[in-house]
Image (tube, helix red, strand yellow):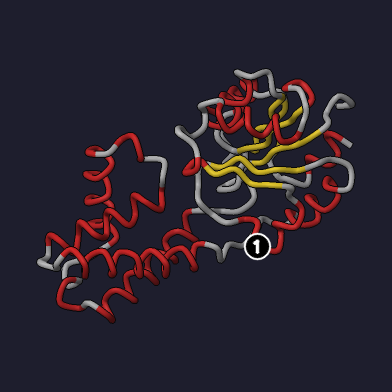
Amino acid sequence: MTTVQAITFDLDNTLWETDNSILKAEAKMKKYLESVAPQWMTDFSIESFQKTRASIVRERPEIAHKLGEIRKLTLQHWFLQKGAQNIEASRLAKEGFEVFYSERQDVKPYPGTDETLEILARKFPLAVITNGNADVLSMPIGRHFQFALMAQDFHSPKPDPVMFEEALKRLQCKPEECLHVGDDLDHDVGGASKLGIKTVWINNKNQPTQYKSQADYSIKTLPELVTLII
């Protein structure tokens, strides 16, 4: 793959498993809020939180991709419904989000991820394009990346081209000179392909092989990427 000049990566379920880390962060958020506001947390559960969150998203679809803002609004709405005053609801929402977000960064990269990124970073500039809000640059593996673009800082998430276009601009390369690696066929493969960016689909969930044709390349684990492009 001699034309590749730069590589961009998705994060969640590409470099690490996401669901368990989110559940762990939400459990810690819940425990904290129960300790500081027990009177309003008696019937709080992850399911009730998600139901409230869904109603906020329906009301504010234009900010659905701004995950931090949505989480704070959801918590604020919860406490207001339970009888908290605006100032207290806002404070609790802010504190709850901070606890969640701190724990959200405690992810465990898939085996071989750090080593693979280290090898690739010696030859290519690496960057991140994510719809999530994990702060990868604050993590140990963040040292391999030149920058990270998060959907919450743009008007639309992937597969909208805006983040891919910004990445190409910063990397100073043409679409055909860039390779995007991700697990989502719509957001990652579809979004990048529309701009002419080469794509690698990480099929770590063992999805049916007929989906392979949507990407330029398909792998099951990140370390396979080294033998694919070097």
Q: Residue at x 59, y 43 (%)?
A: 149
Residue 26 or 63: which is nearer the viewer? 63
Question: Which class describes the residues within 10 Å of circle 1: few (<14), some (14-19), or many (20+)?
Answer: few
Using the image, determine if residue 22 lies above or below residue 124: below
How far from the left and from the top, in percent, is residue 92? Answer: 28, 69
Q: Which quadrant is the N terminus positioned in?
A: top right
Q: Quadrant of residue 195?
A: top right
Using the image, determine if residue 86 lies above or below residue 121: below
Q: Residue at x 47, y 54 (%)?
A: 19
Q: Residue at x 76, y 20 (%)?
A: 176
Q: Quadrant of residue 136?
A: bottom right
Using the image, determine if residue 93 lies above or below residue 11: below
How far from the left and from the top, in percent, is residue 15? Answer: 64, 50
SS label for mark 1: loop
Q: Residue at x 80, y 56 (%)?
A: 115
Task: Give the residue furthest to the bottom.
Answer: 35
Using the image, determine if residue 146 lies above or below residue 184: below
In the figure, is residue 78 to the left or right of 21? left
How far from the left and from the top, in percent, is residue 106? Answer: 56, 66
Q: Quadrant of residue 45?
A: bottom left
Task: Give the residue furthest to the front.
Answer: 87
In the figure, is residue 3 to the left or right of 137? right
Q: Which quadrant is the C terminus positioned in?
A: top right
**Total numbered labels:** 1
Task: Give the residue furthest to the left.
Answer: 83
In the figure, is residue 224 to the left or right of 123? left
Residue 121 or 50: which is nearer the viewer? 121
Q: Mark 1 = which residue?
A: 139
Q: In the rendered structure, which amino acid carries the disc numbered 1?
A: Met
